[in-house]
Image: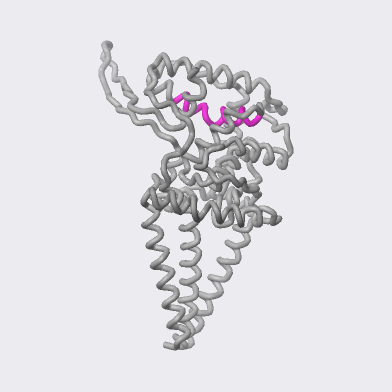
């Protein structure tokens, strides 16, 4: 083994060991919080404006170059092994491993470490609401939903029309993030970017992606506008230091629901009303549900779109779920803010089977909504 090959192997092992150590250290909440505040935040403030001003998605270009370089290195290493030059083959494999471990260390330091931060700093209802209280919130919420839905511009098939250009919409969304005054969140707001290869995202049913080392919230530009709006809100939350998926949704929904803009607020209702329906159904499943017609049309169109496009959806879900589980999350289920309840099957007075749900704690998103509409 030559000295060069030996040095490459040593460097590779050091980076692998460092990446693994960093990964396990950031499972500790205090370490995760420290890394986020004192490594990621300063890094993002310095490099975020640089990446944002580039006219392309740094992550997308970097991913392409990385895959290309990896394929070339592996191909040449195989070539050298076949031609009995194991020294050069081993060196190239070591370089490939070093490249992967360096990127892994970078992402762990600036991305996955944030999954284990302290609880999200968004106001939530702390008490367990009674049926009457949930009913009052539910009525107020849906009355406002109906009003906001009635303010939307509609196209010929009854679906909503965004009154802004895509550039205007992005600027409005970024403006909403200025209302987060807690130091829990990164003060810098990145520029959301279209992903040029959105056709690949369509195939895997992916709406957005954020690569924290480049501080870029990326979104699928081929979606409906209301989906882009919610996705950009969600992905921006990741760049702000909120990596847990349900937390990113909560931040996005909070800003949308509290916006003064009727279109942004409508998108907030469009994505949160299932949480309110579930809250009322858990405590009274006979409650009549009414959804504004435009919201029904919008959700139906979006469902049809993804059903047609997402030919590799299951594979995409499996990969995403595997990644999230590696970061101590509940796979793709971690996108949903869940209640804590007890399910009991009983026989009623008429001899019919009936399921009773006893809610012990509503979900974080439900409690966020309760806090907004309780009074």
Q: Name which residue lies at 53% across and 70% down.
A: 70
Q: Quadrant of residue 236?
A: top right
Compared with 95, 177 (above or below) is above
Residue 27 x, y percent position in the rendering: 37, 52
Colour approach in the figure = one colour
Q: Residue at x 45, y 16 (%)?
A: 135
x then y, percent, for residue 197: 63, 54
In magenta, the rendered stretch is 263-278
Which picture quadrant has residue 232? top right
- For the N terminus, the image quarter is bottom left
Secondary structure mostly seen in magenta is helix
Instruction: Look at the image and say whether residue 74 sits in the magenta stretch.
Output: no
**Residue under the image location 33 percent in, 28 percent down:** 341
**Nearer-the-camera pick, 305 or 175:** 175
Count of marks overlaid on the render: 0
Q: Is residue 205 in sight in this rendering? A: no
Is residue 344 visible from the viewing direction of this image? yes
Residue 235 left/right relative to 193:
left
Is residue 309 left or right of 166 when viewed as pictured?
A: left
Give the vertical position of 261 relative to 211 (above or below). Answer: above
State whether residue 133 is above or below residue 155: above
Residue 140, position as x, y percentages in the image? 53, 17
Q: Camera-side residue: 264 or 223?
A: 264
Q: Is residue 267 above or below residue 167?
A: above
The single residue placed furthest to the top in the displayed view is: 349
At a point 53% along the width and 43% down the height, the residue shown is 185
Q: Position of residue 192 (x, y in %)?
A: 64, 47
């Amino acid at each position: 083994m030559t000295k060069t090959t030996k040095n490459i192997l040593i460097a590779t092992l050091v980076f692998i060991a460092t990446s693994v150590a960093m990964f396990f250290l950031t499972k500790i909440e205090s370490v995760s919080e420290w890394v986020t505040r004192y490594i990621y935040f300063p890094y993002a403030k310095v490099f975020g404006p640089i990446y944002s001003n580039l006219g392309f998605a740094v992550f997308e270009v970097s991913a392409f170059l990385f895959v290309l370089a990896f394929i070339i290195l592996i191909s040449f290493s195989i070539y050298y092994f076949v031609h009995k030059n194991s020294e050069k083959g081993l060196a190239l494999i070591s370089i490939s491993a070093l490249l992967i471990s360096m990127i892994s260390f970078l992402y762990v330091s600036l991305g996955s470490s944030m999954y284990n931060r302290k609880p999200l700093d968004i106001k939530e209802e702390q008490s367990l609401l009674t049926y009457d209280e949930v009913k009052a919130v539910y009525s107020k919420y849906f009355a406002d939903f109906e009003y906001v839905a009635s303010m939307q511009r509609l196209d010929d098939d009854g679906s909503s029309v965004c009154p802004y250009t895509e550039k205007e919409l992005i600027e409005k969304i970024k403006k909403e993030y200025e209302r987060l005054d807690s130091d829990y969140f990164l003060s810098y707001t990145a520029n959301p970017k279209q992903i040029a290869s959105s056709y690949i995202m369509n195939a895997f049913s992916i709406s957005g992606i954020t690569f924290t080392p480049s501080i870029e919230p990326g979104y699928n530009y081929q979606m409906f506008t209301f989906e882009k709006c919610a996705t950009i809100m969600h992905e921006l939350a990741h760049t702000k230091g909120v990596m847990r998926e349900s937390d990113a949704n909560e931040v996005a929904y909070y800003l949308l629901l509290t916006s003064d803009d009727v279109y942004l607020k409508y998108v907030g209702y469009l994505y949160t009303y299932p949480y309110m329906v579930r809250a009322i159904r858990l405590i009274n499943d006979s409650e009549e549900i009414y959804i504004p017609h435009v919201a029904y049309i919008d959700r139906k169109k979006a469902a049809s779109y993804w059903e047609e496009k997402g030919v590799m959806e299951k594979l995409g879900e499996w990969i995403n779920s595997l990644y999230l589980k590696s970061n101590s999350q509940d796979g793709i289920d971690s996108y949903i803010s869940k209640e804590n309840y007890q399910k009991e099957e009983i026989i009623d007075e008429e001899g019919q089977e009936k399921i009773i749900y006893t809610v012990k704690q509503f979900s974080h998103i439900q409690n966020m909504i309760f806090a907004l509409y309780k009074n």
